[in-house]
Structures are given as structure tokens and as C-alpha cells.
Amino acid sequence: MKLDEIKISKAIIQSYNNKLIDALDVDVAIVGAGPAGMVCGYYLAKAGKKVVLFERKLSVGGGMWGGGIMFNEIVVQDKAKRLLDEFGIKSRCYEKGYYLADSIESVSTICSKAVKAGLKIFNLISAEDVMVRNKRVVGLVLNWSAVEIARLHVDPVTMRAKFVVDSTGHPAEVARIIERKSGIRLNTKTGKTMGEQSMWADVGEETIVKNSKEVCAGLYACGMCANAVFGGPRMGPVFGGMLLAGEKVAKDLIKKL
């Protein structure tokens, strides 16, 4: 059989268009495909919810790929070891309470399991704005990341979601858009994003799970974004809190849905 380049192009364009159109009205839209966002998407999809995830970069995984200072090993504490086991990620005990895992295996396995559970991931797409109706977040405004990078004057498209999850890490991009543009008071002490504090792994790992919760009507924070919104410390290359935060937000949303 001879390969026809036009048929190849047609197959890609038609398939992607159908997938994107189906993603324009969902139960949950997640922004940011770090470990917390992907774990959140995994549990939601596993529960039968219609969930999509938008990532502005070419690759998923956030900061997990590089481990600590580009040494591709991550640490996970006792509380989150069960999640490594659930995903089938190999781990080994460093000393009591500290487990090591290969960061490449961790990211690729979480992504694969999430997609196979039904999560639809769209890379190279940025959430440049949100849709707000009656002081509630009801969707996202999307554009190609290349448009954003090149600063081209190209209008975006919109999608609707019952809930949006901000899993954009340190920048807390969706929460900051809402703070800047909507006039909505966030569920923080100041009513605004409070910013992350300096590194303190012990406290940061606790608060990242505690802070992964509703930011305002229709919007949840998840993972490092939660500490950036509610004012918790960063924690560095220990990732148990990220995994637990994704699980927590998913369970909260499953109850609401």
C-alpha cells in the first residue's frame, strides 16, 4: 500500500477537530498538566466524569520530569506511597518515611494511566481568560500557545465547564486572571491570591493538600497552585503532596457533580 500524505493530514485534522469539539462542554476543565492536575484528571475520569486538561507546553509533567536540580529522582513520603502503588510506579525506601521513584517513570505512568482512564489532554493550548456568569466561573477562553508566545492578534475560542481546576503551579494563572479581571473576591484571608512562601517542605506538604480546595464559585486550586493562592510554602522535589492534592480535589468534585 502506498501512503498518501493528504490522507494522513486529513485523518489528523478530522480526528483532532472531533476531539476538540467534544471537549467544549464538560464536567471539569483542568488547566496545567503537572502531577497534581493529571492525578486529579485520572480520578475524575475513573469516576466516569467528562474531564479535559489543557497544557500550554508541548510536554506534560510540570516540574516532576527534572526531579531535584535535574537529577531525575523524586521523593515521596509515607502518606502518598499508596498512590505510587496504585499507579504501578516502582519505588524504593531510602530510609524510614522517605521513598524514591524515578521521575521519568512517574510522569509517563501517571499520564498513561490518566489517559487510559478517559482523561482528554490537549497540549499546546493556553487558557488566556475565563468565562464568568453571575460571579461564577463557568468556562475557559482558549488559544494556541504559539499565538500567545508570538503575541499575535488572533481571537480565542471558548469552552464550558461545570467546574474549573487551576493546576498551573507557582504562577496560579487562572486565579490571578479572576482576581485581576472579574472583581470576584477569592476565598482567601485577603480576598486575593496571597502568593507562595519560601521553602519549608514539612509545612508545604501539609498545606498543599489542605489548600487544594474551592477558590471561588466554580474554581478549585490544586497542587502548588493552591499554596500560591492561599499562602503556603513551596516544598521542592518531594511530590507526595502533589499526588494527594490531585486526589483530594477530584474527590471533592465527584461529590459536587
Image: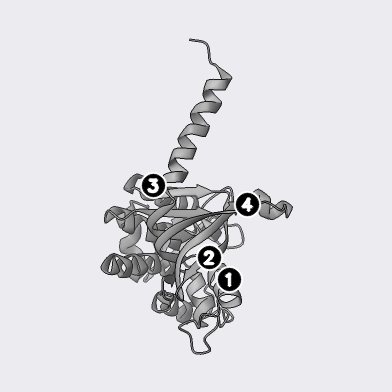
**Residue that badge 4 annotates:** 145
Q: Position of residue 53 (x, y in %)?
A: 46, 54
Mark closer to the observer (2, 4): 2
The structure residue drawn at horizontal position 59% and vertical position 70%, both measured from the top left corner, is: 171
Q: Quadrant of the C terminus?
A: bottom left
Q: Name the residue type under label 2.
A: Val
Lower position in the chain sequence, tag 1 or tag 3: 3
**Residue that badge 1 annotates:** 177
Above or below, 89 against 234 in this view is: above
Q: Which mark is residue 89?
A: none
Mark closer to the observer (1, 3): 1
**Residue that badge 2 annotates:** 130
Mark closer to the observer (3, 4): 4
Lower position in the chain sequence, tag 1 or tag 4: 4
Q: Secondary structure at mark 4?
A: helix
Q: Secondary structure at mark 2?
A: strand
State if disc 4 and disc 1 touch (CB < 8 Å): no
State if disc 2 and disc 1 touch (CB < 8 Å): yes
As measured in the structure, the alpha-carbon distance from the residue carrying label 1 to the one carrying label 3 is: 28 Å
The structure residue drawn at horizontal position 55% and vertical position 73%, both measured from the top left corner, is: 178
Q: Secondary structure at mark 3?
A: helix
Q: Name the residue type under label 3.
A: Val
Q: Name the residue type under label 4.
A: Ser
Lower position in the chain sequence, tag 2 or tag 4: 2
**Residue that badge 3 annotates:** 115
Residue projecting furthest to the top: 1
